[in-house]
Amino acid sequence: METAQRVVVVSRSARGIDERGLHKTNLAALRESLIRVARPGCVCLIDGFEVPAFEYEQRAVVGGDGLSAAIAAASIVAKVTRDRLMGRAGEQLPEWGFGAHFGYSTPAHRDAIREHGVSPLHRMSFQSSAYQQVALNS
């Protein structure tokens, strides 16, 4: 963070992802963040795939976080941001224990879903075996 010229984080809601689909939502969020950091003459390195309808030069780098420090740094910023968001969600929705397991499919996470159902943060379009154990009203 100290050496970056610009850092942009774009997030989307679970409901928005459910409505538009994960891949489409990810591409739109990536496009928005790149537009905010890209400058004329730059080449945007993107992990694995190209962003459609994007006006800057781009290069898809398969396995990018293992090949590019910039892509690796972006992955770290995204993960740390997500974990912090889940920590705050753990304070607001303590019955699901997000502050401890950060929403990853741990036994504690599956137990919380079994006991409390899904939270407003759970993506209903995500096919999780943990969701199959509860009756879902979507």
Image (spheres, rainbow, N blue to C red):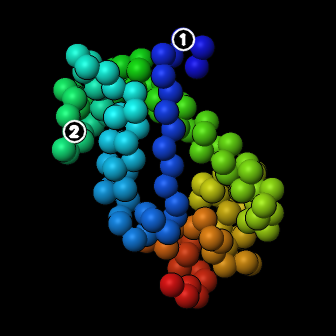
* Badge 2 element: loop
In-image side of 118 versus 68 (left or right): right
What x and y, as percent, mark residue 43?
Answer: 25, 21
Residue 25 in the image: x percent, y percent? Answer: 37, 56
Residue 100 placement, left or right of 102 = right
Viewer-side residue, 112 vs 94: 94
What kind of residue is marked 2? Answer: Phe
Q: Is residue 43 left or right of residue 102?
A: left
| Identity of the residue drawn at 59% across and 81% down | 133
Going 37% across and 42% down the picture, which residue do you hit? 32
The answer to which of marks 2 and 1 sits earlier in the sequence is 1
Residue 21 tag number: none
| Residue 15 % position (x, y) | 50, 69
Q: How many marks?
A: 2
Q: Could you say which is closer to the camera, residue 125 or residue 114?
A: 125
Residue 79, quarter of picture: top right
Above or below for 74 versus 90: above
Which residue shows up at 51% across the image and 16% down it? 4
Please identify the quadrant where the N terminus is shown. top right
- At 31% from the left edge and 57% from the top edge, which residue is drawn? 24
Q: CA distance from mark 2 to mark 1?
A: 26 Å
Q: Nearer the viewer, residue 85 or 28?
A: 28
Label 1: how many Cα within 10 Å (few below 14, some 14–19, many 20+): few
Q: Which residue is disc 1 drawn over?
A: 3
Q: Which residue is mark 2?
A: 54
Q: Nearer the viewer, residue 113 or 7?
A: 7
Q: Secondary structure at mark 1?
A: loop
Locate residue 120, reporting x and y percent. 62, 70
